[in-house]
Every structure is written in structure tokens, then in C-alpha cells.
Amino acid sequence: VLLDYSPEELNFYNKVLDFIRAQYRKYYMKLEESKEKETEDTEEISARDLKKIAKAYKNKTTLTFALIMLTRQLASCRQTGVKALQRYRESVEDMAEQKEIDILLNHAKQLSGDKKLETLIKLIKKYKTKVIVFTTFIETMNQIGTELAINGISHIKFHGGMNLDEKEAAINE
């Protein structure tokens, strides 16, 4: 199914992706600068310097994972992506980056509807049969469940966080 996003919604997604790309570039530029410094003083690396290097690599991994997850959550459902962006903002210390994220979050608040959810609802109504909707994120599952309920479509949630009795009850419904 080809989604025909509104110009506003497409603009929002593009701006968030531009922000994510900029975060990668910014961090990798800093990482390259620190590598250059490291190679200048390779024979005189102290324990303190080693800790700094280890912290830089840990931060790289953490940032990379956070940005990958942010991208995946945004692709899953706009509301899920917005919540992920809010959580990401909480971890950002740079005031300029916080302001940039605030602008993105305000942009998201201006949007009405979600093309992916609207399309899903239309497809379910069109085919009038039982369907299984797979999603990676529980937040997206909850968002879909809310939209289904608003549209009078009965649904059952089933996810890995449920215990065995809850799963069996969901299957038997």
C-alpha cells in the first residue's frame, strides 16, 4: 500500500530525519577529532585518557542505538516516534539541540491525523475480516488499539510482555 502523506506530515518526517542525520554527523566529527588527538600522543596514554576513550566509545554506542531506535519508532507510528523524541530530548544536554527538538515536537503537535493509522483503519474496514497486525513497539500497538476502538473495531492485544495466562486469555477471546 502506497501512503500518500500530506505535505505537512512528510515535512515533519523529513525534518526529524534531517535532525537524526545531523546528530550522527556531529558525533562522528567529534569522534574523528578525538581519534586524531589520540594518534598524536599514542605513547603517552594515561589511565585517565583511556577512561576518556572508553567513555567516548560507550557514548558512541549509546547514541547510535538511541538514534536507530528513534528512527525505527518514528517509522512505526508518528505518535510512537514523538514519544521517543521526547525521551531522547531528556538525555540531551546541549541547549541548542534541546531547542531544535522542541521545534520538532511543536511541529508534530500541529499535525492532524496519521496517514499510516488512517490507512490501516480503512483497510480493516474495507475487508471486514479478522486481521493480525504485527508491530515492533508496544507503544505503537497501544496507539493502533486506541484508533481501532475509536472506529468501533474490536481488537485483542497480544505481546511478549504478557504472562502465559494473559496470552491464553487473549487467544481464547
Image (tube, rainbow, N blue to C red):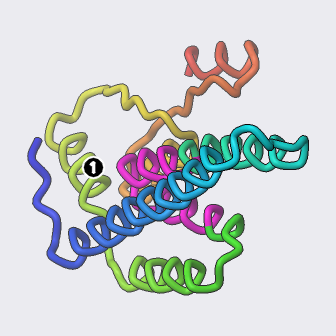
Find residue 20 and report its image quarter.
bottom left
Amino acid carrying label 1: it is Ile
Q: Quadrant of the N terminus?
A: top left
Would you place residue 97 above or below residue 69 in this image? below
The extreme front residue here reads 43
Would you place residue 24 above or below residue 38 in this image? below
Would you place residue 81 above or below residue 165 in this image? below
Question: What residue appears at the point 57 percent right and 15 percent down from the top-left corner?
Answer: 172
Find residue 8 and report its image quarter.
bottom left
Magenta residues? 66-88
Question: What residue appears at the point 14 percent right and 53 percent down from the top-left corner?
Answer: 3
Relative to the observer, which residue lies in front, 143 or 3?
A: 3
Question: What residue appears at the point 19 percent right and 42 percent down from the top-left corner?
Answer: 123
Q: Quadrant of the C terminus?
A: top right
Mark 1 Cα shell of 10 Å, populated few (<14), some (14-19), many (≥20): some
Q: Magenta span has 72?
A: yes
The extreme right residue here reads 47
Query: Residue 107 vs residue 64: left or right?
Result: left
* Residue 13 image position (x, y, % from top left): 30, 65
* Residue 103 image position (x, y, % from top left): 46, 85
Relative to the observer, which residue lies in front, 71 or 118?
A: 71
- Pointer 1 residue: 121
Would you place residue 149 above or below residue 98 in this image? above
Question: What residue appears at the point 62 percent right and 49 percent down from the top-left corner?
Answer: 40
Q: Secondary structure at mark 1?
A: helix
Query: Residue 95 vs residue 104: left or right?
Result: right
Q: Magenta span has 164?
A: no
